[in-house]
Amino acid sequence: MKYSFLGIFFCALGLAGCLNVSAPSLMAPSATSTRANLGSVLPGNYSSFSHWLPWLDSKVAQRTANTVTVGQWSKPAADLDTSLLISLSTGTYAPAPEKFLSVSGQVVVDQNSTPVTLRGLSTSNGVYWLKTSQELVDPYAPWFVLYDADYAAMQSMGVKVIRFYMQYYWLKDALSQNQFFHYLDQQLALAHKYNIYIILNLHYFGVDWEVNQGLDDGFFTGDQYSRGYDLVNFWDLISKRYKDESMIAAYDLINEPRVRTGFKESNLTALYTSMIQKIRSNSDSHIIMVAEATGDAASLDEPGPFTKQSDNNIIYTFHYYEPFEFTHQAYYKDTQYELGAEYPFTTRWGDYTGGYYSNPYWQSTTGNTWQYYQGNWVDLSALTTGQFSVSLSAGRLEGRVWFDEIVLESRNKSTLLVTNIPLKNATFTLPKTYVGTTPQPSFLPASWYFTGNWIPNNATDYASNPSAYYRMDTASHTADGSGSLFLDATAVTWPVSNAYASWGQSAGIMPSFFAVDSNSEYRVSAWIKIEANTQWVVSINHDFFTTHEVLKNKAYLQTGLNAYFNWGQTNSVPVFCGEFGVTNPSMRDSGFPNSPAMQTNWINDMTDILNTASVPWTYHVYKSYEQRGDVFGLFNPDDATLQNTLKTKF
Ligand SMILES: [Ca+2]
C-alpha cells in the first residue's frame, strides 16, 4: 500500500493558508506515494526515517531475542518448520492440479470449471523492513511470516486467498533465492493444507540501502531503469520454479506501478507484455495480474484505467483508498494524516482570495521573552463574502520567532459581547501520531501547516541543518510542556521578492475555515516571543477563501469503483480490488469514540459494493499491526472490531 489519491486534493490546497503569495511549492506535492510525498514535502529531519531507526532496532533486537509479541502473534522461532513437518508427514501437502485456476470471461474457475471467488487478505506490510530473505527463514519476523496458526485463523475467518507480498531484493542472488524459495515452499505447503490460494505480488523494489532505511522503492520513485531492475528475470525465476503449483492463484507482477516522464503508461504496458511472454514461454499458464498505472497525468498516455493485453488469462487489478483522509488517518509519522477523520468524510478546501494584513507588525519582544499580541477588531464582512482562517507570519524574518496560545474571538457589534471561537490545537499540545500502538513525539504540529518560500542554507544536508520550522517541545508560553510553533530564519536564505513564512490552518486534510457573521467583528491574538530580529515582520492575520466541499460517502465510493467495473464489463475481463483497508489505531483512541462504528461502516460499504458487483478483493492487511507507523492490520490487541466486521464478508 503506497498509493495516494490525495495528490490532486493537495494541489488544490496548495494556494491555501498563504500570505501574499503564489502557489507555495512546499505544500503542493504532486500525486505520488505517501512516503514519497513526505520526502518531497517535509524538510530536514522529517523527510528521513532516521528518527525511527532506534525504535526499529529495538524491535529487531526483540525479535532476535524471540521475545516480541505482535498483537496476538507471539511465536517460537521453531514454529514454522515444526508445523510444516507435521503437515508434510501427514501427507496434507499433495499436488492438486484440479485446483489450478484460470480466467473464463469475467470469472475465475478451477480445472473443473467451477467458479472460485477470490476474497481474502493481503499480508503483510512488514515487507519493507525485512532486510534479507534470511529473516524469512530464521524467522525473525513474526509480524510478516505466516505460520500454521495464521493459516488456521484465516481459514476459520473464511479467507480464500492471500495476496502475498514479495521483495525484489529477495531474489538478488543464489543464496537469497534459496532462502526465499525455501520459505515460499513452506507457505505453499500450508496453502495446500488449509486450501487457501496465494497471489504472489512483487510489492517492493528496494535495493540494499533503501531496504536498510525502510525507504520507498526505485520503481515508485522513478529511476528503476538506472538501477537495473530486471522484472522479466524476476518473474522468470518464479515461473520456472512454480509453473505447476496449483495453489498459486495468480502472479501480481508489479504493485502500484507508477509512470512518469521517460516511462509512460505505454512503456509499462510493453513491460507487462514482455513479462507475460516470458512467463508463457515457460509453459506457465497461471493467471497474471496487470495493475492500474498511476502517476503523472502527462505520462498516462493510454485511455482507461487499464490497457488490455492480448493474453486472455489476465486479471486487471486496482487499489482503492477513499476517502484517503479517513483510511489513512494516523498514517505514520505525519500529522497531515490526522486522527479524527470521519466516514462519510467531507473533503474541504479553499481558494485563497486575499486577507486582512493590517494587524500590528512586530520586530522584537522585550528581553526575548513572551509578550501578548492582540490584533485589531476587524469587520471581516466588509472585506470578504467567503470564509476566513488565521495565519501566523514572519516574512523576511532574520532571527527566530515562537507563537503560542492562539486566541480567536468574535464581538457582537450591538451588544459588544465577546465570544471565543475554538481553534484546533491552539496551544500546540503533542499531536497524536502513531508508530504501532504507541503515540510518538512529533516534530510537526497537528492542525497547523507551514507555507513559505525560504531556502535552507544547506538544503542537501539536512542532518547538519535542522529544519527551520517545527513544533518546539521545549518552549511554551506557560512552560507547561505543551510546546509552541517555531520559525527559525537563521539557517535560511530569503528570495529577493515575495518572501514569506507562515503557519496556518487552511491546508491539510482537515482545514479550519470560519464563516463570517456580518453582525460581528473578529480579533486574533497570541503569545509571541522573538529573538535576534531587526525588522517589523511578525504578525497574525485573517486569510480569506472561497471554500468547496465534497461529501465522500457510499455513493461516492460506488461512482469511483464503477469506473473499474464498467471497464471490466466492456472488455469482458475480470477486475480485482487488490487493496483497500483502513488504519487501525484510531479505533483505540478514546478521543474518537465513534471510529469503530465508522470503520465498520466503511468496510461494510466497500465490501457490499465489491460483492454486489461480484468483483473479488484482498483487504490490506492481515497483520503487521504494531510494526509500522502506517498500522494497517486487522489485529488490534484491544479491539476485534475490524476482524469481526471483515470475517463475515469473505
Ligand atoms: Ca503551548
Image: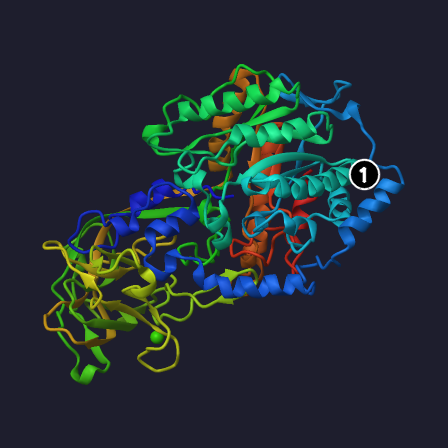
Residue 316: quarter of image? top right
| Towards the viewer: 421 or 603 | 603
Q: Residue at x 72, y 59 (%)?
A: 74
Residue 574: quarter of image? top right
Q: Residue at x 10, y 73 (%)?
A: 534
Assess disc 1: are there few (<14), some (14-19) or many (≥20) residues with their C-alpha within 10 Å of its C-alpha: many
Residue 492 visible here: yes
Q: Where is residue 86 shown, x and y percent of the image?
A: 86, 46
| Towards the viewer: 84 or 305 | 84
- Residue 335, relative to residue 568: is it above or below? below
* Residue at disc 1, CB closer than 8 Å to ligand 1: no
Q: Where is residue 137 shown, x and y percent of the image?
A: 69, 49
Total number of numbered discs in the rendering: 1
Q: In the displayed structure, does residue 292 sit left or right of residue 6?
A: right
Q: Which residue is under mark 1?
A: 193
Q: Where is residue 645 shown, x and y percent of the image?
A: 66, 47
Farthest residue, direction right:
90
Farthest residue, direction front:
174
Residue 409 visible here: no
Q: Residue at x 40, y 47 (%)?
A: 36
Q: Amino acid at mark 1?
A: Lys
Residue 119: quarter of image? top right
Q: Where is residue 304 shown, x and y percent of the image?
A: 43, 23
| Towards the viewer: 87 or 636 | 87
Q: Quadrant of ligand 1?
A: bottom left
Q: In the displayed structure, does residue 71 sit left or right of residue 559?
A: right
